Amino acid sequence: MERDPKTGTEAGRRPTLADVAAAAGVSRALASIVMRGASGASPATRERVLETARQLGYRPDSRARLLRSSRTRLLGITFMVAEPFHGDIVESIYAAAEDAGFEVLLSAVGGRRQEDRAVETLLDAGVEAALMISPSSTPEALAVLARQVPVISLLSAAAVPGVDAVRSDDAEGIRTAVEHLLSLGHRDIAHVDGGSAVASAERRAGYEESMRRAGLAEYIRVVPGGPHEAEGIAAAGKLFADRKPSAVLAFNDRCALGILEASWRAGLKVPDDLSVVGYDDSQLARLDHVRLTTVSQDAAGLAEAAVGCAAARIRTEEPGELVLQPRLVVRSTTGPA
Amino acid sequence: MERDPKTGTEAGRRPTLADVAAAAGVSRALASIVMRGASGASPATRERVLETARQLGYRPDSRARLLRSSRTRLLGITFMVAEPFHGDIVESIYAAAEDAGFEVLLSAVGGRRQEDRAVETLLDAGVEAALMISPSSTPEALAVLARQVPVISLLSAAAVPGVDAVRSDDAEGIRTAVEHLLSLGHRDIAHVDGGSAVASAERRAGYEESMRRAGLAEYIRVVPGGPHEAEGIAAAGKLFADRKPSAVLAFNDRCALGILEASWRAGLKVPDDLSVVGYDDSQLARLDHVRLTTVSQDAAGLAEAAVGCAAARIRTEEPGELVLQPRLVVRSTTGPA
DNA sequence: CGCCTGTTCTAGATCGATCTAGTTGACTGT
DNA sequence: ACAGTCAACTAGATCGATCTAGAACAGGCG
């Protein structure tokens, strides 16, 4: 077996804490104290150990660390690869988790792979909490899960005791969108809903109430839609065939994109002939050629709240439900009536 | 501490292998043999141990298993959350890995989080190989990485010794697309390239050669583009202002989508006034309202090849570069000239 | 009966870290 | 000078699995 004459450790193998300790002339325990920044080491030794660690290229083996300590500092996330907005949130969670001193483990849901399998993988890896984006499991399954590990549901209001939820106030989001359209002089404002998707009911209710409060009850028109482009297109077709409104509130960005495409194909100019508002402020909405006016769910804010919520739960506090205020982002798909 | 009278293990805690062994009346070692399906246990004991494990709801702790054994059976993947086609591949890798007996660990690249950080996380978790989708690291960085762990580069031909590459034959893919258009009677076929994106040069070269070979050298027209919708739109604008071709070959699906949108907005009918071909066969292309004719990179095939390649590398030292043949998927955006 | 072969099973070391319970030695106050 | 306090450090147990080496026991054969 080859050995590095300087360090005495085998070549090719990853250096361990014991190697660092031996090279620095201290015990493993002290080296451990230094590596995790705990108190109990003199500044001089600390410096020396850190320096030898750097020289050897030491990186702690997370498996061993996790095995021993109960605090794994690991957050698990389940998400759907096909959902752009999930991707936005995942990116923000990485940032928020890093700031909070957590590592992140991802587990994708979709296709052949079901949510329960995804969560199981995370648990086996030893995560301290599971952040589930738009969980599709039954309340019962979530409740069972929540007994093993703190569970935070993102984007959907989990009516399960023991499961915390972080989401934004959908009714309020829709209200700001309606107000924006009103201020532009629109009155004939239709809504394409999300069908059976999560949060669809809340958004529809928000739309209806906002319209009524503005004295536009007679203009209320809800067209059945869904969370994907195709459903937006179909809904737009129905809408145009019936009576073209001056503005449409879509269930989400993808649905709005469908409406935009249907408009272009029908030769309608946006926003001159039709104003369109989406929901989510996903990457899609921000693309140069779309520039969709949309209600921002503030992925960064949601992510930060979710990570904070997880951290609180791990400390055995009781956070419960957290509702963020959404914010309207005006871009180029809305204009005067 | 509460104890379950039946099993003798503490309530609330996850049962360990020792608990199972005690409950079944065998040694830990034997229980281990049974759990991992190794030989050396009588059928009767095997059955008994498995049954008690099931009753206790035992799940092996992967951290402990991984710590001890060098075979972690863990594959790491780096990918970009914002790329739909990466999502397709990730889903397929999950399936392929499961069939091959591997677990999958995801690490997202993008935004604040760089590729080297993402890979480091995977290494710390103990993956046996790293599958990097469209790696953006420098060849030097990849080479350094490859000395620590088998690295498989997906979608881009890594010219780094020690790094295996799994990709599809881009020139061939473009060729089949050109032939499809020729058979429909098209002659004025333009190409919107991918700018500085990976594989852009290969596809452009494939286009030029196919055109020349068909005796259509005079029709060769390459418009600078890029891998996103906005760039497709801009290129289409330039193309239509100059002289509208009868068909366009886009660098990828997102670029093709941009061209489609520009066409709709310009009042052009697809495929009557213009045929459009994409590349990737991502989810985007399959959406009902898009139905894009595209060159399929066969995410499932790539994933399977990559996982197989990783498995081979882990066992020994062989594979090198693997090139798959792409396949044209004809949908609704191409028609007779 | 004794020797050999092979199967079934177990004790104990081990992976790389953390954590508990000390030990050591310097410094303080009376 | 002596007990008491505190910071700096260490030995050894520990987490939950795997793995090695060898024990116990069966059956087959001369």
Image (cartoon, coloured by chain):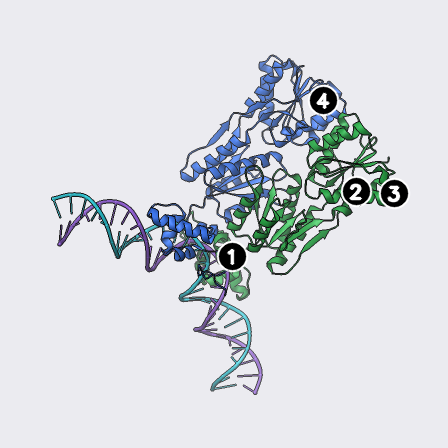
Chain colours: A green, B blue, C purple, D cyan
- Give the residue displayed 45% in from the left and 55% down from the top: B16
Tell me: residue A98, above or below residue B110: below
Please indicate, yes or no, whether residue A286 appears anywhere in the rendered image.
no
Residue B156 vs residue A294: left or right? left
Mark 2: which amino acid?
Tyr
Residue at 61% x, 61% y is A316
**Do discs 2 and 4 belong to a common subunit?**
no
- The residue indicated by pointer 1 is A51
Chain letter of the residue carrying label 3:
A
Residue A255 position, x and y percent, is 72, 35
Chain of the residue on which disc 2 is drawn: A
Q: How many residues crowd mark 2 within 10 Å: few (<14), some (14–19), many (20+)?
A: many
- Same chain, marks 3 and 1? yes
Binning the other alpha carbons within 10 Å of mark 1 as few (below 14), some (14 to 19) or many (20 upward) gives some
Q: Residue at x 79, y 27 (%)?
A: A241
Q: Quadrant of residue A16?
A: bottom left
Disc 2: which residue? A207
* Residue type for callout 4: Leu
Give whichever of discs 3 and 1 has the lower sequence position.
1
- 10 Å crowding of disc 4: few (<14), some (14-19), many (20+): many
- Label 3 sits on residue: A215
Q: Quadrant of the C terminus of chain B?
A: top right
How far apart marks 3 and 4 lie (CA) works out to 49 Å
State the residue position of label 4.
B239
Q: Which-is-in-front pick, marks 3 and 4?
A: 3
| Mark 2 or mark 1, whichever is nearer to me | 2
Give how far across and how far down residue B227 sits, in percent. Answer: 65, 31
In this figure, what is the number of numbered marks?
4
Amino acid on which disc 1 is placed: Glu
